[in-house]
Amino acid sequence: MSTKSPSPGIVQNASLEDRLYTVKYEDPGESHLDVENPGICTTCHEDACVDVCPAKVWRKDADGTPTIAYENCLECGSCRFACPNENVIWTYPERGAGVTYKKG
Amino acid sequence: MTDSTDNGTESADDQPTRTPPPAQPNYDNTFDAIVVGAGLAGSAAAITMANEDLDVLMIERGAYPGAKNVFGGVMYTPTIRDLVGMDGAPIERYVGQRRYAMLTEEDEIGATVNIGDWHEEPHNDSFTVLRGDFDEWLADQAVEAGATLITETTVTDLIRENGYIVGVETDRPEGALRAPIVVLAEGGNSLVSEGAGLKPAPDRKDVAVAVKEVIEFPGDSAQVIEDRFRLGDEDGAAYHYFGEGAAGKSFGGAFIYTNDDTVSVGLAYRIEDSITQGINPEKRLNEFKSHPAVAPLFKDARTVEYTAKTIPEGGAEAMPKLVHNGALLVGDTAGLVLNNGVHLEGTNMAVESGYHAGKAVVEAFNSIPATERTAGATAAGGQTARADGGMVIPSSHLQSYPDRLEESFVVKNLEHYEWLIHRVTEDKELLFEELPAALADAAAEYFAIDREPKQVHGARAKERVLGTLGGLRGLVKLGWRYRKIVR
């Protein structure tokens, strides 16, 4: 069968940035996510956190240090389950901060 | 029921310049039960307890109940109907039409189920809803029943004394709140329960990641939905998709549910597959929406909200211990979600579990004489477990919750499909990739129009399918492997 490339732009605001922009968000001021031991991340080649995250919260520098764009976080928790080293520190954003879903 | 710390008395040594602190009710020790999370399980538990005159406090970390909650989109409502009725429930559409389809990269084979009875009340108790509205409504029912709700308050830990859960720590100033019972209804990402050692962290093989978009159409959005999905004013569609074109090479699937004037579209699959197959949920959702059989449904649409959540799918085997001294686990926190491929249920199980947990708490309180319910009395034979002498309830007094749940559809369904989920996991490649592709090929062959006789095409179509399954023997073996499906 032929491999037609999927037609992009079916939905008008299809980029991740556009979609994250649809989510009401209040910055708690500090990250509710962290890693227990950054050294574990630099030697990790699985990068499960990066693969699974639906909001590009997790990225890795050239040296393997994770950077956490916590303000993108949709609070699904998948990174915490995914990490093979149980290295993700996950706390609920406090006092109602973080995402507020209007529809859910 | 609740006392305020602001008692209004002024003593002589009050500093005249000091502004008094804002009146903040002190909820410590004033409630019979604290419910952590005002989602569906939490509100169902709160309603059940408040209906029996227990003083219940619901603590919600979001700005309002539902603000942190996500699900696919279809709510099954028999228990809610019994509990509070459906008058005023914010439903979007009743489900009048279901469609199950397999997707290869560019083919679709599906079947639509449209049952006449579904168009009559009570509509098979199946409705599309949006959680922002629905959860707030259900929590309102709890408040009307007498429960107290506080929002924007995060439970950070449980208080444990002498082996009993005796309350919660919150992020409020002086935020410790004590009560004889804590119902943990904090969802699948259950940090409090895990942190307090009430349940182990689930394995990533047992947890699915889900993403969803709510989509709107230009112009009269409801009319566009009714035209594209062939619907009337009030009926809705629930489409489930399997195969590589839906959730990639994974144990999972995609869905489309029509709301009143929006459509929910999303997918869910095991976190393990995300890693081993390198599938990112956000990219996968874009690919699903761009599938040639799906894309026309969303032409010119606009995403109005993008959401994500994790789903505990470990089934009956992965269920944690449901009762502890002073605490009960309900809903997603208890791992009560059924995904056997055809049935995707969780919110109804959450409500059912909250109801049974609430009943068990009421029974536990009723088993303790009213005269002994004051501070100092205990349910543990006169021995005071709490440092402040308050009442405690041992897990043995809560056993009717797991017992009732075992007898309910919740655990019966989970146990019934346990084998199926194991089989499907083992046969993942065959069922999600090879078989849909073979069926699509066979269909293409069967319906091919050329100058060869239909018999020839029919024979080739059969070969395609049997080839994938390992011949007739393979088909029989597969049938045997899945024989219990119709039991």
Image (cartoon, rainbow, N blue to C red):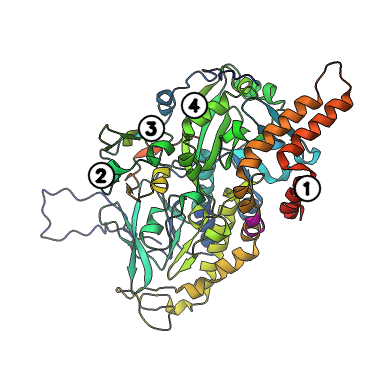
Question: Mark 2 touching mark 4, by CB under 8 A?
Answer: no
Specify few, some or many for label 1: CA neighbours under 10 Å numbering under 14, 14-19, or 20 or more. Answer: few
How far is the residue under mark 3 from the one under mark 1? 47 Å
Residue linked to disc 2: A38
Please state the horizontal and vertical placement of residue B439, each as a whole percent of the image: 73, 33
The answer to whether residue B417 is magenta is: yes
Question: Mark 3 touching mark 1, by CB under 8 A?
Answer: no
Residues at discs 1 and 2 both on one chain:
no
Q: Label 2 is placed on what type of residue?
A: Pro
Please tell me whether mark 1 sits on a helix, a strand or a loop. helix
B268 to the left or right of B486: left
Front position among marks 2 and 4: 2
Front position among marks 2 and 3: 2
How far is the residue under mark 3 from the one under mark 4? 19 Å
Return the residue nearer the eye: B21 or B350.
B350
How far is the residue under mark 1 from the one under mark 2? 53 Å
Residue linked to disc 3: A56
Please state the horizontal and vertical placement of residue A51, each as a whole percent of the image: 42, 36
Return the residue nearer the eye: B146 or B434.
B434
Please state the horizontal and vertical placement of residue B79, each as a whole percent of the image: 63, 54
Residue linked to disc 1: B473
Region rendered in magenta: B415-419
- For marks 2 and 3, the one nearer the N-term is 2
How far is the residue under mark 4 from the one under mark 1? 50 Å
In the picture, the disc for residue B304 is: 4
Question: Mark 3 touching mark 4, by CB under 8 A?
Answer: no
| Label 1 chain ID | B
Q: Answer yes or no: is residue B389 visible.
A: yes
